[in-house]
């Protein structure tokens, strides 16, 4: 599987964050004490549409226990860039991502926006 596909699958919560170990990442600890180490070599920053983040947020939220870890990894992995995070909807989703990574609940507004933008 190509790097772009793996990153996208993790962002969309179609694959667990641990899938990144196949790219050479090391993910240790729990969601609130997470440490991510990058593989050596050139960074492969990929840009994905806001709908991929929205899809991942809805999927990770639906699975419950994976939400904190998923959000933490998405925030920590600099290889994942999301378009339109400065838009009003992007800001709502970004705030939801930070809330989830911190172990807080996602707002109803964020879930509504995520569901609307999601392609699932």
Image (cartoon, rainbow, N blue to C red):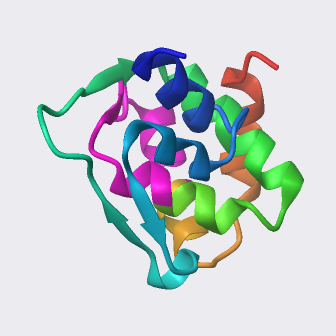
Q: Is residue 70 left or right of residue 65?
A: left
Q: Residue at x 41, y 37 (%)?
A: 23
Decide: is 31 above or below 9.
below
Does the stretch in magenta take in 75?
yes
Q: Which quadrant is home to the C terminus?
A: top right
Q: Residue at x 17, y 33 (%)?
A: 43
Q: Residue at x 26, y 52 (%)?
A: 38
Q: Is residue 26 left or right of residue 59?
A: left
Decide: is 101 above or below 62.
below
Q: Position of residue 119 (x, y in %)?
A: 74, 16
Q: Position of residue 56 (x, y in %)?
A: 66, 37
Magenta stretch: give its range.
Answer: 73-96
Decide: is 60 above or below 68.
above
Foreground of the two, 58 or 11: 11
Q: Is residue 95 visible?
A: no
Q: Position of residue 21 (x, y in %)?
A: 48, 48
Q: Is residue 48 visible?
A: yes
Q: Which quadrant is home to the N terminus?
A: top right
- Residue, far left: 42
Q: Is residue 54 left or right of residue 23?
A: right
Does the stretch in magenta take in 108?
no
Foreground of the two, 26 or 32: 26
Count the labels in the image.
Answer: 0
Q: Residue at x 62, y 78 (%)?
A: 103
Q: Position of residue 63 (x, y in %)?
A: 86, 54
């Amino acid at each position: 599987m190509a790097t772009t596909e793996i990153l996208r699958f993790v962002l969309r919560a179609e694959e667990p964050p641990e899938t990144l170990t196949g790219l050479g990442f090391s993910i240790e600890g729990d969601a609130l004490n997470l440490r991510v180490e990058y593989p050596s070599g050139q960074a492969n920053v990929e840009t994905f549409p806001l709908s991929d983040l929205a899809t991942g947020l809805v999927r990770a939220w639906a699975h419950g226990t994976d939400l904190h870890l998923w959000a933490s990894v998405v925030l920590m992995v600099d290889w994942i860039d999301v378009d339109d995070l400065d838009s009003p909807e992007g800001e709502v989703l970004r705030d939801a991502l930070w809330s989830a990574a911190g172990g807080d609940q996602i707002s109803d507004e964020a879930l509504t926006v995520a569901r609307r933008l999601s392609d699932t």
